[in-house]
């Protein structure tokens, strides 16, 4: 048996009204808004955020593998799953892999995880999926896409079982990006909708329903990925499902989040599920994957764990299209690039990614970064490595306008944080209105892409106001 | 330990005008300051046996060649010294040790920095950890200001009074970068640099150099200033944490390096009550908040009362504890390596009664306080007339 032991989702805090994008270009707008990853977020950071939600209350040492799924891996050569494993502080002797090139890679990774557990090669595998797909300016794609992430922990035991994987493959030129393309490309969608999306999804879903002996009435929710709300509704009808049986795709509030979309929808469906529910999941992309989720028990509540709904409801509206342009670096600008080194990154990865500090055996002082000599009592080499909490309160702060020799009109909040349980750390604050920062304010930490020193992605922690706190 | 009390004399001082000196390079500035100090002492370059030159940035100069090359004193023993923003006063400390030990009789301590060649948007950031490194200088001191506002109720207006007082003093100084009086309103209306510090809370980016001829009192007695040379009563250096932002329990209400260095200096000089015994001081006002916190750290005032003391006029040239009668870093800017030597230039001239226009009344002991880095390196020097 393979089960969902836990799951979690993540949505960036920023949203942009589609009308703002339409007005910026003088083109027609579709209703609603889309999620927009911050300038310091990418598929790795969002996947890690979802991974932390999924693993809340779970020992990271119990995980045997991480599969990272995305069409926007920040590296095309170099694994992304290894960064995720480092930040989530997983064991070193685990299997890590990236699944990419198609938005179907989320369910391809789920199936690979399922197969690994079913075959006995792993006891538990974490699947993380994230995307922030690049849309060409002045096209509808900017309005239709959205950014987000989801994570699922598959294991031998869990409140919901997974089974019956059915797949089809199909070669239809749908949305694509050649290796040299900067933005998602698409042809007139009618061919793809009919012979790609509809044909593949129906084939996979029907095969699954037949294999499991399920009629439309046996299905509590159909969880179907969808780039287009109309095609989504038509698919539901073709499979004999009523509208209430269709899990909302999040199109109006988020946009099409690509690879993680189906898993974000499954997370939302599970949040609203009850024991006995059967969820038929199908995901499209150069063919389709379908599988069945059967809910046997309620998922345990974990203190501090945020459901996807919290991420959906806590949002900040971007004031205009320019902010999106800035986040996405759509305008060429010379930017200050701090120095870095793969050597430092490697040597300090435990401090930087997994956020380890130290506690002195003699005086008990919690300190960061990891020293040889205790900062408080001066004892040498009597420090135990400890994992620092990812939260604390603002001890003091400034809003810094001078960054890299440049005067910025929007300052960078720099925060001295008193860690929960003792110790200090000094981080930038992200995803906030600088005017809201105050001494004593609670903050939580989020891993972000800090800069591109030495021409690699330098990830490090920032703090943010507690979302949904 | 004997220390340097009454064993080291300043026999001559020199200082360039500070400011945006586009037409001169660091060599021109150093030559100008050193020759002025030599003239003041009545000696020639060949009389210099050794030198220490305080420089922060490698773009200003590397090695003893920073001094030897412009002075064309080839073959002399010279050390370039870096100790953050206290580099200049640490050059004096090393020079003092050399003459006190009797290794040399006449040496030069000097400092120079050519910041404007790098542009004017804050100090260039060099080195540091790729992701865990520090931050801009204004931001570092702003962290202290936010905490003082929170704990002691200080306000932006309290900070503004420091800037107004120092700018008022700087008007009279012919070598100051800024010689313009400002109002509290000017300070409060200036653009933010690092909240809560605005542009007038920060010292400017400037170029400059300063130099001191250092010897022993018995030799100074035979030189040009035989009647009004100045002697060291104490010098102390303290190096505290470079990373206060990570230091558990660091309260940000003052800087341990200043507390330690001044305690050591007071002990060496035999000072029990600095507020009464020190006549005036040039203190490191890289930011207005720094001057207020220094006042407490140096024992001039109960720390939370510093803002009130400034408002009450205690620190004016005519007050009973004049602080930065020269106009301080606020009016001179802070060419890093030069600042500590410039402070000693100012204190020497005050003690000699040569501080035209900003002369404090009958000074007996003058203190110079040079603070570096994120307030981690502090050098305190106390000068006086020979007993």
Image (tube, coloured by chain):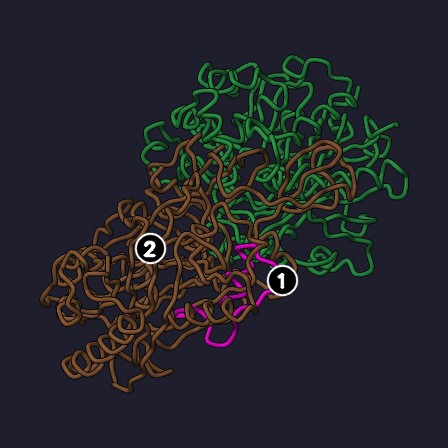
Q: Residue A228 appears in which quarter of the rendering?
A: bottom left
Which residues are drawn in magenta?
A: A69-96
- Which chain gets the brown colouring? A
Q: Which chain is green?
A: B
Q: Which mark is residue B307?
A: none
Q: Position of residue B179 (x, y in %)?
A: 44, 36
The relative height of residue A340 versus residue B142 in the rendered view (above or below) is below
Determine if the magenta segment contains residue A91.
yes
Q: Main secondary structure of the magenta part?
A: loop
Q: Nearer the viewer, mark 1 or mark 2?
A: 2
Q: Is residue B4 magenta?
A: no
Disc 1 or 2, which lies upstream in sequence? 1
Residue where numbered disc 2 is placed: A267
User: Is residue B318 visible in this depiction of the protein?
Assistant: no
Q: Do labels 1 and 2 touch, CB within 8 Å?
A: no
User: Which residue is the extreme one toward the front?
Assistant: A213
Q: Is residue B305 visible?
A: yes
The image quadrant where one finds the N terminus of chain B is: top right
- Answer left or right for B373 relative to B119: right
Q: Which mark is residue A92?
A: 1
């Amino acid at each position: 048996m393979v089960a969902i032991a836990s799951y979690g989702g993540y949505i960036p805090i920023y949203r942009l009204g589609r009308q703002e994008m339409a007005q910026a270009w003088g083109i027609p707008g579709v209703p609603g808004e889309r999620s927009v990853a911050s300038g310091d977020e990418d598929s790795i950071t969002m996947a890690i955020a979802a991974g932390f939600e999924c693993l809340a209350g779970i020992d990271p040492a119990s995980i045997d593998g991480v599969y990272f799924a995305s069409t926007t891996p920040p590296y095309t050569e170099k694994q992304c799953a290894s960064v995720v494993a480092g930040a989530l502080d997983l064991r070193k002797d685990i299997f890590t892999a990236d699944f990419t090139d198609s938005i179907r890679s989320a369910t391809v990774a789920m199936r690979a995880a399922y197969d690994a557990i079913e075959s006995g090669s792993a006891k538990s595998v974490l699947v993380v999926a994230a995307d922030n797909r690049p849309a060409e300016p002045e096209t509808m794609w900017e309005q239709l896409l959205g950014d987000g992430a989801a994570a699922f922990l598959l294991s031998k035991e869990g409140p919901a079982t997974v089974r019956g994987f059915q797949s089809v493959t199909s070669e239809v030129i749908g949305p694509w990006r050649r290796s040299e393309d900067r933005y998602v490309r698409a042809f007139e969608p009618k061919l793809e909708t009919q012979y790609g999306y509809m044909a593949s999804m129906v084939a996979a879903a029907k095969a699954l329903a037949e294999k499991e002996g399920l009629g439309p009435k046996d299905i509590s929710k159909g969880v179907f990925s969808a780039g287009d709300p109309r095609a989504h509704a038509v698919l539901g009808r073709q499979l004999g499902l009523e509208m209430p049986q269709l899990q909302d795709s999040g199109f109006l509030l988020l946009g099409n989040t690509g690879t993680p979309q189906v898993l974000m929808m499954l997370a939302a469906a599970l949040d609203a599920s009850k024991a006995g529910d059967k969820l038929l999941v199908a995901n499209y992309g150069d063919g389709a994957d379908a599988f069945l989720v059967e809910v046997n028990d309620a998922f345990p509540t974990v203190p501090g764990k945020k459901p996807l709904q919290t991420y959906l409801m806590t949002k900040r509206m971007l004031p205009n299209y320019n902010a999106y342009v800035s986040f996405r670096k759509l305008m060429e600008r010379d930017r200050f690039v701090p120095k870095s080194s793969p050597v430092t990154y490697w040597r300090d990865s435990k401090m930087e990614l997994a956020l380890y500090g130290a506690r002195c055996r003699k005086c008990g002082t919690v300190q960061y970064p990891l020293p040889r000599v205790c900062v408080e009592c001066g004892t040498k080499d009597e420090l135990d490595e400890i994992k620092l909490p990812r939260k604390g309160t603002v001890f003091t702060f400034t809003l810094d306008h001078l960054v890299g020799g440049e005067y910025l009109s929007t300052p960078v909040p720099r925060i001295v944080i008193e860690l929960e349980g003792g110790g200090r750390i000094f981080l930038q604050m992200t995803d906030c209105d600088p005017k809201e920062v105050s001494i004593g304010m609670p903050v939580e930490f989020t891993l972000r892409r800090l800069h591109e020193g030495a021409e690699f992605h330098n990830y490090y922690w920032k703090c943010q106001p507690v979302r949904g706190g | 330990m004997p220390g340097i009390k009454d064993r080291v004399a300043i026999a001559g001082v020199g200082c360039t005008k500070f400011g945006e000196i586009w037409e001169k390079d660091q060599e021109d500035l150093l030559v100008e300051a050193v020759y002025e100090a030599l003239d003041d002492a009545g000696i020639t370059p060949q009389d210099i046996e050794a030198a220490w030159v305080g420089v922060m940035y490698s773009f200003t100069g590397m090695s003893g060649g920073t001094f030897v090359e412009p002075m064309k004193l080839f073959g002399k023993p010279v050390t370039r010294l870096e100790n953050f923003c206290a580099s200049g006063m640490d050059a004096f400390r090393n020079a003092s040790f050399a003459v006190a030990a009797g290794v040399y009789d006449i040496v030069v301590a000097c400092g120079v920095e050519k910041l404007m060649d790098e542009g004017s948007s804050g100090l260039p950031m060099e080195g540091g950890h790729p992701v865990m490194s520090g931050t801009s200088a204004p931001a570092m001191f702003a962290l202290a200001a936010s905490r003082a506002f929170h704990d002691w109720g200080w306000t932006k207006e309290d900070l503004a009074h420091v800037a107004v007082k120092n700018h008022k003093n700087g008007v009279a100084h012919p070598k100051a970068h800024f010689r313009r009086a400002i109002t509290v309103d000017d300070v409060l209306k200036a653009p933010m640099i690092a909240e809560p510090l605005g542009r007038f809370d920060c010292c400017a980016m400037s170029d400059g150099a300063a130099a001191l001829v250092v010897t022993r009192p018995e030799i100074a007695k035979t030189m040009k200033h035989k009647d009004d040379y100045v002697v060291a009563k104490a010098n102390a250096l303290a190096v505290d944490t470079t990373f206060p932002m990570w230091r558990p329990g660091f309260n940000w209400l003052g800087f341990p390096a200043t507390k330690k260095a001044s305690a050591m200096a007071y002990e060496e000089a035999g000072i029990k009550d600095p507020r009464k015994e020190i006549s005036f001081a040039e203190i490191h006002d890289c930011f207005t908040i720094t001057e207020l916190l220094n006042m407490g750290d140096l024992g001039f005032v109960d720390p939370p009362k510093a803002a009130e003391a400034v408002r009450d006029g205690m620190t004016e040239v005519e007050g009973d504890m004049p602080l930065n009668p020269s106009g301080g870093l606020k009016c001179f800017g802070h060419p890093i390596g030069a600042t500590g030597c410039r402070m000693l230039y100012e204190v020497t001239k005050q003690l000699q009664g040569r501080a035209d226009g900003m002369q404090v009344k009958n000074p007996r002991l003058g203190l110079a306080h040079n603070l570096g880095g994120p307030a981690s390196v502090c050098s305190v020097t106390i000068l006086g007339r020979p007993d």
